[in-house]
Image (cartoon, grey):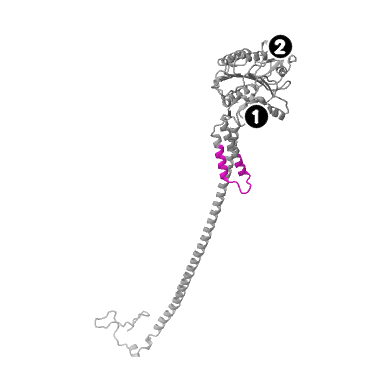
Amino acid sequence: MSNDERSSDAPETISLCDQSDGKTYALLIGVDKYVAFEELNVCENNVDLFSDCLIRSVGVPEDQIYCLRFGFAKDEPDNFTYQPFQHVIEQRLDDIFKIAEKDNRNKLVVMFSGHGFEVDGEAYLAPTDLRITSKEEYIKETAIAYRDLVAQLDRCKVRFKWLIIDACREPGKLANDNRLQAFWRVLRSRRFHKPERSVILRSCESEQKSRFVSPDGFTNYSIFILALVEALRGFGTSGQITMKSAVDHVIKETQKRSYHHGWEQDPCFSTTFNDLNNIILTDKIEGLTVSQFKKGRDLINKAKRLFDEFLYPVQSGGELKKLQEASNMVQEALDLNPDPAGNLYHEGIRLKADINREVQNRINKQEQLKNERTIRRLKKQLKELEEEKGTKSNELGKRLASQNTSQTKEESISLDEYKLEQIREPENDTKSRDDRSNRPNISDLPSSLNNNSDAAPLSSERSDDEPPLNDNFEQGNGDKYI
């Protein structure tokens, strides 16, 4: 922390989030496009991010925040009223100071993100239409003098003033840049007057560059602004967010991230307040009150422990009820409605997704085991049916075999009877022939009958007085016999 501090006559507590005790106004300037400098493609993103943080975390109404950037008004992309040209910036600075001075209890935040440089020992901020020529006077006329900005801030009679300068980096390939020196070298000088009741926070020390990164791989943000937004959202704290805690977080995180990338960047600040703990930036952490945030944090931590116990059980396997209990805790924390851009919200969403994925995996395993058991049961039933079918088939086979045996026997008996009948029929024929052979032959008749020539001739007609022929007479050899 800088020792560059001076006593203030206002030891009372100041709250940026309390709009009932003086309103908080903000003017945020982001300059990406330049006529003379290279395009930055990060400063307008910083304005958008910080504006959203003031609304969500600090509680500043949207209509009390003014932003200067290209295409700020979506329905009026060509509206020059809010684009960061020199005359527009100067006009909007005058406007915001006048608005804030309507009530001396009001608070004011001014942020600039863009190029900065020095000419002849004087520091300047670069608007879009800055012209770099060999004439120093022309450069001065088209830039925003830092000395003038500090003087305006000092004349503004409000309760609290916060100036944030994120001079993106030292000037790069500029026209005639041999006449330009490091912007922060002069800005850090003690000879500048510090505005009363103010805090000035700068992104880096002298001879350093203000670096930026792309957290999502698409959108660039200054690591200084990222750390500041994190501080306002309650990262690394569990109580009220004061200017002291925010400054400490910004310095620590910016240094850590720049070191991680092999850079060197050390934010610095100056103030006229004795105790920065008396300046409360927000009593909300990620959109929640302190007690709500603590409750949400405790719920998330307990859910994490339960989830870890399920994933890495000490004794037995993980119990599904632990996952359900952890899921309920996470949902309870999310029901508190934390800031969607805050760490607590993102932790809850990620943890809930992990729990739901593990629950789905467990359900899939249970379904798989259930299907396997069903398949085994069906196979067993099929086997039993096949065995039962085999038994019945054997019984039916035996029956059929038994019936076939009986039928064969009957057929055999019938065949035997048939053969016996066949045997008997010739015997009968022989007996009949024997009977015929036993009949009396004509030669055996008496000769008197055989030689009676006087007998009357036989007639084919028979008289009524004649007796009927004997039944024992048969027809034979074409002759009739008495």
Q: Please, is residue 476 above or below residue 80 in the view?
A: below
Q: Quadrant of residue 67?
A: top right
Mark 1–mark 2 distance (CA, rounded to whole Å): 37 Å
Residue 403 painted magenta: no
Residues 11 and 421: in front is 11
x, y percent for residue 476: 37, 80
Disc 2 marks a residue whose amino acid type is Thr
**Left or right, 160 with reference to 268:** left
Is residue 277 visible in the rendered image? The answer is yes
- Dot placed on the residue nearer the N-terminal end, 1 or 2: 2
Question: How many residues crowd around disc 1 within 10 Å: few (fewer than 14), some, or many (20 or more)?
Answer: few
Q: Which residue is mark 2?
A: 133
Give the extent of the magenta segment: 304-330
Residues 84 and 196: in front is 196
| Whether label 1 touches label 2, CB < 8 Å | no
- Image point 58% across, 32% down: which residue? 293
Q: On residue 215, which mark appears?
A: 1
Characterize the magenta stretch by its predominant secondary structure: helix
Secondary structure of the residue carrying tag 1 is loop
Disc 1 marks a residue whose amino acid type is Pro
Secondary structure of the residue carrying tag 2 is loop
Residue 310 painted magenta: yes
Question: How many residues crowd around disc 2 within 10 Å: few (fewer than 14), some, or many (20 or more)?
Answer: some
